[in-house]
Amino acid sequence: MRYIIQWTNKYSGESGYVASISEKNRYFNNTYNVNDAKRYLRESHAKGTITKLIHYGEGNNNNFEIIII
């Protein structure tokens, strides 16, 4: 099993997947293609990434959900 993170904008309803995060610049790069999403081997790693994104302020506009693929 692999885990990916799906984001959904709280206001527009637009959604996609987290492709990568920039810890230096404190944001994430998105993709609309599930095949380009960053894959995590452990759910705990995906949860850690979501925690970082919320800390960066990305949770103000987006909801994040872990998807199993």
Image (tube, grey):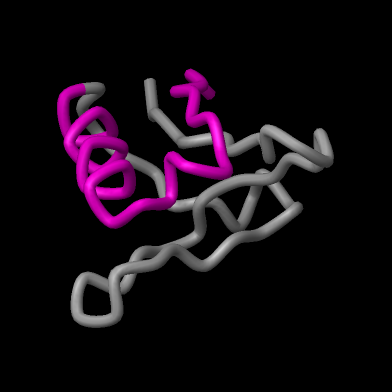
Q: Nearer the viewer, residue 35 or 46?
A: 46
Residue 4 x, y percent position in the rendering: 46, 35
Residue 38 x, y percent position in the rendering: 43, 52
Q: Nearer the viewer, residue 22 or 54?
A: 54
Decide if residue 49 is on the left or right side of residue 3.
left
Identify the residue at horizontal 53%, vertical 24% (top origin). Answer: 69
Image quarter in which the N terminus is found: top left
Identify the residue at horizontal 39%, vertical 67% (top origin). Answer: 27
Residue 42 drawn above or below residue 9? above
Residue 67 x, y percent position in the rendering: 51, 21
Write the start and end of the magenta stretch as one range: 44-69
Identify the residue at horizontal 22%, vertical 37% (top origin). Answer: 51
Total number of numbered labels? 0
Q: Is residue 46 magenta?
A: yes
Residue 21 x, y percent position in the rendering: 35, 65
Residue 8 drawn above or below residue 56? above
Decide if residue 41 is on the left or right side of residue 28.
left
Decide if residue 41 is on the left or right side of residue 61.
left
User: In the picture, residue 8 is in which quadrant?
Assistant: top right
Residue 12 drawn above or below residue 28? above
User: In the picture, residue 47 is in which quadrant?
Assistant: top left
Identify the residue at horizontal 64%, vertical 50% (top origin). Answer: 35
Q: Nearer the viewer, residue 49 or 13?
A: 13
